[in-house]
Amino acid sequence: MKGLEGFPQITPVIKLEHEKINFGGLWHSDTAYLERPPMATMLIARETPPRGGDTLFANMYRAYETLSEGMRRMLDGLVVVNSSAKADVTRTREDRVRDSAKDDARQEYVAEHPVVRTHPETGRKALYANGGHALRFRDMTVEESAPLLSYLFSHATRPEFTCRFRWEVGSIALWDNRCTQHNPVNDYHGFRRVMHRATLKGDVPR
């Protein structure tokens, strides 16, 4: 996506009054389909609906640490294949996405990352598979991978791992993509919501 004119590193995230689907409207970690996903994401609210439009966050440290010992042992050796094509189903207004894409943007981005990654600063392990981008496990089919991935997606977003952020104009949220998932709640049909997003360069998940 192209950034704002004069500020190419800031991307607008907009839902218009007539739109029913919001951009990125499911649990995910930003652009896990890139070889080097962003370390962190920052959003600032420019226009907010009179009600709704909150963002949910989930702690992936807790998601991993509360799995059984046997499950953790199995996941530690698995790699997940992530694709940007899967994220297409959550996009709002394909005409706007198409018109604002960068000139060198590819049709699909695919990257393989460990299902469990070790945070390079804290040394803690975190679950790193999300429903927006994870297609299958490496060396497995989509069908073979589906039952375990479905369980992990559900487990990762249990209510006790989550918090809810309520936006006001000028609110800023900054989160660590290496150990967090988020979900923008789509409950404000008929109203406009405008956010500006900046991401921080990350490393290769390990």
Image (cartoon, rainbow, N blue to C red):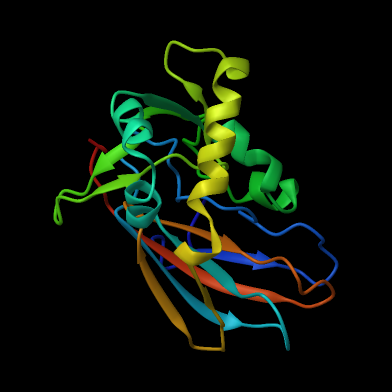
Q: Is residue 4 visible?
A: no
Q: Is residue 23 shown to the viewer in this render?
A: yes
Residue in view at x 21 percent, y 49 percent: 119
Q: Is residue 87 above or below residue 55?
A: above
- Against 97, residue 184 (above or below) is below
Image x and y of residue 105, in percent: 50, 36
Q: Position of residue 159 (x, y in %)?
A: 55, 64
Q: Quadrant of residue 173?
A: bottom left
Report x, y in % for residue 168: 56, 88
How many numbered marks have been drawn onto this rendered protein structure? 0
- Image spot of residue 196 (x, y percent): 50, 71
Q: For the C terminus, give its image quadrant.
A: top left
Depicted 206 relative to depicted 147: above or below: below
Give the camera-side residue of 154 and 53: 154
- Residue visible at 46% across and 35% down? 104
At horizontal 66% and vertical 75% (from top left) the residue drawn is 53
Q: Give 91 or 97, whichever is nearer the viewer.
A: 91
The residue at the point 51 percent across, 30 percent down is 106
* Nearer to the camera, 61 or 5: 61
Compared across the picture, whether 110 is left or right of 76 comes to right
Left or right: residue 17 versus residue 113 is right
